[in-house]
């Protein structure tokens, strides 16, 4: 639906919650977090019949994410909980989460339906059981909640020294009975309906870590802390078989239900073991994760096992190997350790390069998680590392990447990313196009092992040229070297036979045209070197009062930002080589800086946990805010719509939306010494609903949904045909439906067939037909005769079309909606035919002619289908223009239509002229 007059609108700010200022930045608004997949809380699964797919639900701190098992596509992320989630569970209707001594029941992963309060300590075990929910908290109290009524059905405290609950399960077909496992190694079967213990089983003295019902009746698998696995028959208290997992603690058990009798056990060191229950032996093993496997679930009737781990990854393994083993099928993963450097890559702003403490380089997509990819781990010997197990200790692994530089000019031809590592001299190259580690290790000749004197020298900064051919590297010894990134050969040493600086190089910059190179050292010297020619002496030099900590530049504007060790920031014009701005306000070490795409803003982050925005033209600070953890790296998107930040000891990358792009923001100068307001970090979904907001909905929407179990809520919003009666509204039909009416004769002439159409064979000439483009016989008035005669007797010679009859009916009913609905569904040819058939010479009537004019007046009066009414009126006047002047009864309605049409067009014309005038003025102002 298209509306010609737009209403004034503004983007609503996000709500403040819990009395803490959550959205006090003037420019940036929390958007979402990238790179979170799973943590130490076991994940759960739920099969949805309507989707014919299994949903995977993983915990990521204060919220949970829902994926599809078919493609690991992220469906949605829940709202924030008041504290970290401690337990997850699911049934066919709800997803249950435990947080801060409360239990929340979520519908479709987004809507809270119930809240269960009453636990004195955090809940660590959940088990949905029919219409009941069983919860065990850290005080060893078992509560049975009635799900629909939010009431406690049963409250059973256990003594911790006698039976400390560590696991629970519900065996199939056991009505009102659950199995409890304890720290003491005992099992208890409890009847929650009668609040009684049916029996106590004691088969192993070590702590029970997990209980998993088997596909066979009365059988469960029990895992213990010492690695013992027992397959137990509950009915007869008999051990059917026992296995010993030498790796130690059994974290999870799962039975395959697709045929083969395989029991999957997970361990705390990241391994999984596959036990053959028929042959009572180990069938295979697999290392799935770097850390312990917290989730191992065999999908129902599929040869697939789903795993998660605190290493921030989730995986699907499929059993299709020739020996019956499993291989990795799909994976979603993020950094296993916090990122240290992030940068937007390319000009579209959809890819973020991230280097973490785990020595990996990853690509995160701002569009979809399915586009995320890992470029691998940095290693001295890629071939040797490839032969080893990726989870085993690798002596060839390189230290983490501290900083990297990338360019898209030669992306598909050779390596286009260069990275420096902590504490070493080597610089690695990477290729974004092939998503892997490159072939070169850039080391100057004087620092190679045979020539190296000072083994403490390391790389400190790096920059690539705009052409994509060279990379310039600074070292702690003061050397500045240039390499060809295609061949990996050393090309030039700035300073000749002597180092470029007497102290460690802290920053580098290069202009857009490769005319000069700028370097800064820890003694406060900033030198300008010619890119080519004589590079032994700098062409210019700036001496600063304090040492340089880091440098960032904006190539298009030739602006260079220099962060000093005293937390001051200087902005230097690289063309004139003059300090043009000085910014003072940070109180701790500067971590990173970035320019906005138009170079108007300089955004800085430091260890004082603040992020400040400096307006370069006015030399004022226009925004600042404080975050939970210090920002260690930040990058502005090339389009200026998002700011990406990485924070100390956090695995994610956080996106902040630029509010000035979608809202009118009035910026003012702010005192840099003014305390920065606190802003919470973005959540894992854009505009995630806070728990308090969801609780407000709970008070008015606490009824069970009358939808099929296991299905998700389909909240569909249908746009009304007209948003407001005073708005002139278009029909929304294809333009060809009304534009072709004006040139229909020309189109028919162009599409005229070469041969005339053939009539139906043996058709009696006296049979009445229905008016229209298709040949149809009118048998509606045929009388039923008893003599068997097939000759039709015509009872009326009126040749009005169906549209004409609807128009005549409006003379008495004054209801034009059926006629409007009928004509708007016709194609251009039929509309032309219907309008021409209204004239008495074509089989119509004067009444139909008059009512058509009233129909057009009705369409103009309701402000609907504006363009259709104009087209229909044009065809009507073109076809019957002469006859209208000869019919006095049509002149009066024609004048009424003219007045209504003129008023409607004047409204539109005034808005169009105003809009074009504003655009022309802005265009002239820009020039």
Image (cartoon, helix red, strand yellow):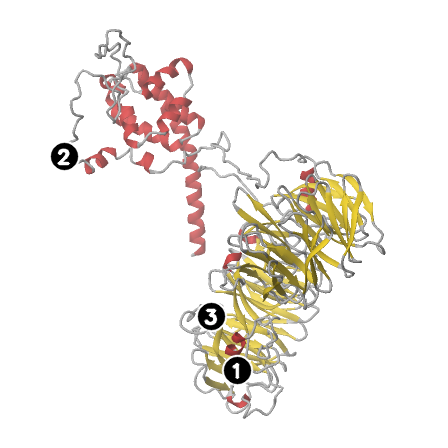
Mark 1: give few (<14), some (14-19) or many (20+) Cα within 10 Å: few
Q: Which disc, if any, is residue 540?
A: 1
Name the foreground residue: 427 vs 174: 174
Asked whether the beta carbons under mark 1 and mark 2 sit within 8 Å of each other, the answer is: no
Residue 268 percent coordinates (x, y): 68, 65
Asked whether the beta carbons under mark 3 and mark 2 sit within 8 Å of each other, the answer is: no
Closer to the chain start, of discs 1 and 2, is 1
Closer to the chain start, of discs 3 and 1, is 3
* Residue at (66% x, 75% y) in the render: 565
Report the residue that reaches farthest toward the top.
Answer: 786
Above-or-below relation of 900 to 198: above
Q: Is residue 887 left or right of residue 503?
A: left
Closer to the chain start, of discs 3 and 2, is 3
Pointer 3 residue: 407
Residue 735 percent coordinates (x, y): 35, 38
Name the foreground residue: 371 vs 782: 782
Mark 2: give few (<14), some (14-19) or many (20+) Cα within 10 Å: few
User: Helix, strand or loop at disc 2?
Assistant: loop
* Residue at (68% x, 74% y) in the render: 566
Above-or-below relation of 778 to 181: above
Work out whether residue 817 can be spotted: yes
Instruction: Quadrant for residue 221, please give it.
Output: bottom right
Mark 1 → mark 2, Cα distance in angstroms: 85 Å
Name the foreground residue: 766 vs 568: 766
Instruction: Quadrant for residue 342, please give it.
Output: bottom right
Mark 3 → mark 2, Cα distance in angstroms: 63 Å
Q: Which disc, if any, is residue 531?
A: none
Mark 3 → mark 1, Cα distance in angstroms: 27 Å
Q: Is residue 194 left or right of residue 239?
A: right
Above-or-below relation of 541 to 96: below
Q: Which disc, if any, is residue 755?
A: 2
């Amino acid at each position: 639906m298209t509306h010609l007059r737009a209403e004034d609108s503004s983007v609503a700010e996000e709500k403040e919650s819990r009395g803490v200022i959550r959205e006090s930045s003037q420019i940036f608004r929390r958007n979402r977090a990238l790179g979170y997949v799973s943590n130490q809380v076991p994940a759960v699964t739920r099969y949805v019949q309507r989707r014919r797919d299994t949903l995977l639900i993983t915990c990521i701190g204060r919220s949970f994410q829902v994926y599809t098992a078919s493609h690991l596509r992220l469906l949605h992320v829940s709202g924030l909980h008041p504290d970290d989630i401690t337990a997850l569970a699911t049934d066919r209707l709800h997803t249950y989460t435990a947080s801060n001594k409360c239990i929340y029941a979520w519908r479709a992963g987004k809507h809270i339906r119930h809240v269960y309060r009453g636990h004195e300590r955090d809940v660590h075990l959940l088990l949905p059981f029919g219409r009941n929910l069983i919860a065990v908290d850290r005080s060893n109290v078992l509560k049975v909640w009635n799900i629909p009524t939010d009431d406690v059905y049963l409250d059973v405290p256990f003594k911790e020294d006698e039976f400390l609950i560590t696991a629970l399960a519900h065996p199939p077909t056991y009505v009102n009975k659950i199995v409890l496992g304890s720290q003491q190694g005992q099992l208890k079967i409890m009847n929650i309906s009668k609040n009684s213990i049916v029996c106590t089983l004691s088969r192993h003295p070590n702590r029970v870590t997990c209980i998993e019902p088997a596909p066979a009746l009365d059988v469960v698998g029990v895992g213990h802390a010492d690695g013992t696995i027992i397959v137990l028959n509950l009915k007869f208290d008999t051990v059917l078989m026992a296995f010993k997992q030498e790796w130690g603690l059994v974290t999870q058990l799962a039975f395959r239900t697709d045929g083969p009798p395989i029991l999957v056990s997970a361990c705390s060191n990241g391994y999984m073991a596959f036990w053959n229950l028929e042959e009572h032996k180990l069938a295979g093993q697999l290392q799935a994760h770097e850390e312990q496997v917290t989730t191992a679930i065999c999908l129902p009737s599929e040869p697939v096992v789903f795993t998660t781990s605190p290493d921030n990854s989730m995986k699907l393994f499929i059993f299709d190997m020739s020996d019956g083993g499993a291989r990795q099928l799909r994976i979603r993963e993020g950094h296993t350790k916090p990122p240290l450097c992030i940068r937007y890559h390319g000009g579209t702003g959809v890819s973020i390069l991230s280097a973490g403490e785990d020595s990996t380089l990853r690509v995160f997509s701002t569009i979809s998680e399915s586009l995320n990819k890992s470029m691998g781990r940095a290693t001295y010997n890629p071939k040797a590392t490839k032969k080893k197990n990726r989870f085993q200790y690798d002596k060839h692994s390189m230290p983490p990447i501290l900083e990297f530089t990338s360019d898209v000019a030669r992306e598909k031809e050779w390596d286009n990313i260069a990275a420096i590592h902590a504490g070493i001299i080597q610089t690695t190259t990477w290729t974004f196009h092939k998503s892997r580690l490159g072939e070169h290790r850039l080391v100057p000749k004087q620092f190679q092992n045979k020539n190296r004197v000072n083994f403490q020298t390391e790389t400190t900064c790096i920059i690539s040229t705009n052409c994509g051919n060279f990379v310039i590297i600074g070292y702690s010894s003061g050397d500045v070297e240039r390499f060809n990134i295609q061949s990996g050969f050393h090309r030039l040493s700035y300073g000749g036979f002597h180092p470029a600086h007497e102290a460690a190089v802290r920053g580098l910059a290069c202009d857009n045209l490769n005319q000069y190179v700028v370097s800064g050292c820890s003694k406060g010297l900033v030198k300008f070197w010619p890119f080519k020619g004589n590079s032994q002496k700098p062409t210019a030099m700036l001496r600063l009062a304090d040492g340089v900590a880091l440098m960032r530049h904006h190539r298009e504007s030739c602006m260079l930002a220099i962060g000093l060790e005293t937390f001051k920031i200087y902005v230097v014009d690289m063309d004139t080589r003059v300090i043009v701005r000085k910014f003072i306000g940070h109180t701790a070490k500067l971590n990173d800086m970035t320019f906005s795409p138009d170079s108007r803003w300089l955004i800085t982050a430091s260890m004082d946990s603040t992020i400040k925005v400096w307006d370069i033209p006015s030399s004022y600070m226009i925004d600042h805010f404080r975050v939970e953890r210090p920002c260690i790296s930040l990058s502005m998107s090339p389009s200026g719509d998002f700011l990406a930040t990485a924070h100390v000891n956090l695995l994610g990358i956080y996106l902040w939306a630029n509010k000035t792009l979608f809202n009118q923001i009035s910026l003012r100068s702010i005192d840099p010494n003014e305390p920065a307001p606190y802003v919470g970090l973005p959540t894992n979904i854009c505009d995630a609903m806070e728990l308090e907001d969801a609780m407000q909905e709970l008070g008015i929407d606490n009824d069970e949904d009358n939808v099929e179990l296991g299905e998700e809520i389909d909240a569909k919003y249908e746009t009304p045909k007209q948003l407001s009666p005073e708005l002139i509204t278009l029909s929304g039909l294809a333009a060809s439906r009304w534009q072709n009416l004006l040139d229909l004769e020309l189109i028919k002439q162009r599409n005229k067939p070469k041969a005339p159409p053939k009539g139906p064979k043996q058709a009696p000439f006296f049979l009445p037909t229905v008016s229209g483009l298709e040949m149809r016989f009118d048998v509606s008035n045929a009388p039923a005769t008893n003599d068997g005669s097939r000759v039709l007797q015509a009872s009326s010679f009126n040749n009005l079309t169906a549209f004409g009859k609807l128009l005549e009916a409006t003379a008495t009913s004054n209801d034009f909606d059926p006629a409007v609905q009928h004509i708007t569904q016709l194609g251009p040819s039929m509309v032309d035919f219907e309008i021409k058939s209204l004239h008495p010479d074509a089989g119509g009537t004067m009444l139909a002619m008059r009512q058509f004019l009233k129909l057009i007046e009705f369409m103009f009066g309701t402000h609907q289908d504006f363009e259709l009414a104009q087209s229909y009126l044009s065809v009507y006047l073109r076809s019957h223009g002469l006859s209208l002047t000869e019919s006095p009864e049509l002149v009066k309605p024609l004048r009424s239509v003219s007045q209504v049409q003129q008023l409607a067009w004047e409204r539109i014309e005034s808005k169009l002229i105003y809009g074009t005038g504003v655009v022309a003025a802005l265009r002239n102002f820009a020039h």
